[in-house]
Amino acid sequence: MNCRWLAITAFAVVLSAADTRTPPWATSQLVIGRDLFRENCAVCHDIDKDKMHSRKIGPSLNHLFTNPTLPMSHAKPNRQYVVVRIKYGGALMPAFSKKLDDSDINILIDYIASK
């Protein structure tokens, strides 16, 4: 009886520990987002520096969704605006609608939002 109780307790501990880890699919999505950022955005934008320390042509995307306004438009940060800007570009920013599909754009925005 004691062995059975010990086995059940050990199993419960293992299950509860498994719940605290980051799910593998979430980690891989952020890695994909990081790679998309490096391939498409890093030439013009920083992600790990604030705008005062960025020396790139585009604004820093560090804390993009927690800032009170977006860097260029001064609009309140929202996902839909960022999707449109990525797809169709802006004054100096090229459009990426032919290079990135909706899934890629959403993964990229999730990565930017994580910074």
Image (spheres, rainbow, N blue to C red):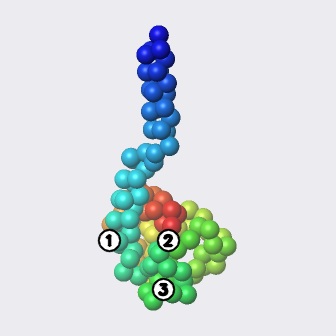
Q: Could you tell me if residue 82 is visible in this image? A: yes
Q: Which amino acid, mark 2?
A: Arg
- Residue marked by disc 2: 85
Q: Residue at x 38, y 46 (%)?
A: 24
Q: Residue furthest front?
A: 2
Residue 82 % position (x, y): 52, 67
- Please tell me which of labels 2 and 1 falls first in the chain: 1
Q: Position of residue 104 (x, y in %)?
A: 38, 59
Residue at the disc numbered 1? 39
Name the image quarter holding residue 94. Answer: bottom left
The answer to whether 102 is drawn above or below residue 21 in the figure is: below
SS of the residue under disc 2: helix
Q: Residue at x 45, y 48 (%)?
A: 22
> Which residue position holds label 3?
54
Q: Is residue 104 left or right of residue 2?
A: left
Mark 1–mark 3 Cα distance, whole angstroms, equals: 18 Å
